[in-house]
Image (tube, rainbow, N blue to C red):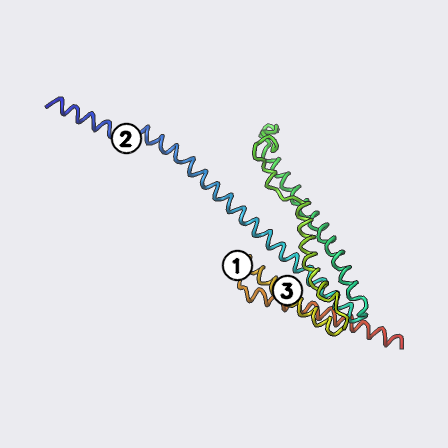
Amino acid sequence: MESKQVTKEGEARVAEPSPASENKSVAISMPNEKEEQLKEDKESSNDSQIGQGLRAAVLGANDGLLTTASLMMGVSAVNPKFMILSGLAALIAGACSMAIGEFVSVQTQRDVEISILRKRKINKDGTEAQKPESSPFSERDALPNPLLAACSSALAFSVGAFLPLISAAFIEDYNVRVGVLAGVSSLALFMFGVVGAYFGRASLVKGGLRVLIGGWIAMSVTYGLLKLLQRTEVADDV
């Protein structure tokens, strides 16, 4: 009886988990949970960056379309012969301006973030604890690329500017040309607004109408002011 009791007690002792084994299991599970959390955060950050990049591309294309269409409408109010030439000039000048502006902006942001990274690597005694380049996954790899941002901005602007330019390039009649230009630009503006609202998680209809109405105002103001300027110059000549 005593031996059985001892055996049962021994079995009970073996069956009970020891504190060391519990700590070991916790120590094993914690890093796994941390790695999963870091993986989820990284994926969420990547998705956010992709969404922001696409939204920036849509906004760049919208700027290209609206700038080119408004300039073409305004120039046509003064001299219809230079309508296509003005659109081409707007495409080239606007793309270059967007690229240079984006490069300077992103390069400045990159310099600031690199400076912050260097400050984090300095010990209290003033020595550098670890250089960013020495780690396998350098923090600099996650910084924005100025050249890529410049090229993307110029390309997005060019795509948007190409739509009104190509829509009016092969039409001879002035009234038909203006009508086609206004129609294509209006449709594209509405679609850009819808896509931008989608990435911004806003109302698609409101987003499309907001951009469309803004585009109409910009084109009307440009056309009206240059038309008024032309009439003023004609009156002065007379």
Residue 201's tag is: 1
- Toward which corner of the image does residue 126 lie, by quadrant? top right
- Circle number at residue 188: 3
Find numbered disc 2 in the image and state the secondary structure of the residue it sits on. loop
The mark closer to the camera, 1 or 3, is 3
Examine the rendered structure and indicate whether residue 138 appears above or below residue 61. above
Amino acid type at mark 1: Arg
Question: Which element is circle 1 on?
Answer: loop
* Residue type at numbered disc 3: Ala
| Residue 182, quarter of picture | bottom right
Pointer 1 or 3: first along the chain: 3
Residue 79 x %, y %: 81, 70
Pointers 1 and 3 in contact (C-beta within 8 Å): no
If the image is split into quadrants, where does the N terminus sit? top left
Q: Position of residue 226 (x, y in %)?
A: 78, 70
Q: Distance between the residues labelled 1 and 2?
A: 51 Å
Dots 3, 2 in contact, CB < 8 A: no
Residue 40 percent coordinates (x, y): 47, 44
Q: Which of 179 and 41 is in front in this view?
A: 179
Residue at the disc numbered 2 = 17
At 87% from the left and 75% from the top, the residue drawn is: 236
C-beta proximity under 8 Å, tags 1 and 2? no
Which quadrant of the figure contains the C terminus? bottom right
Q: In this view, does 157 lie to the left or right of 41?
A: right
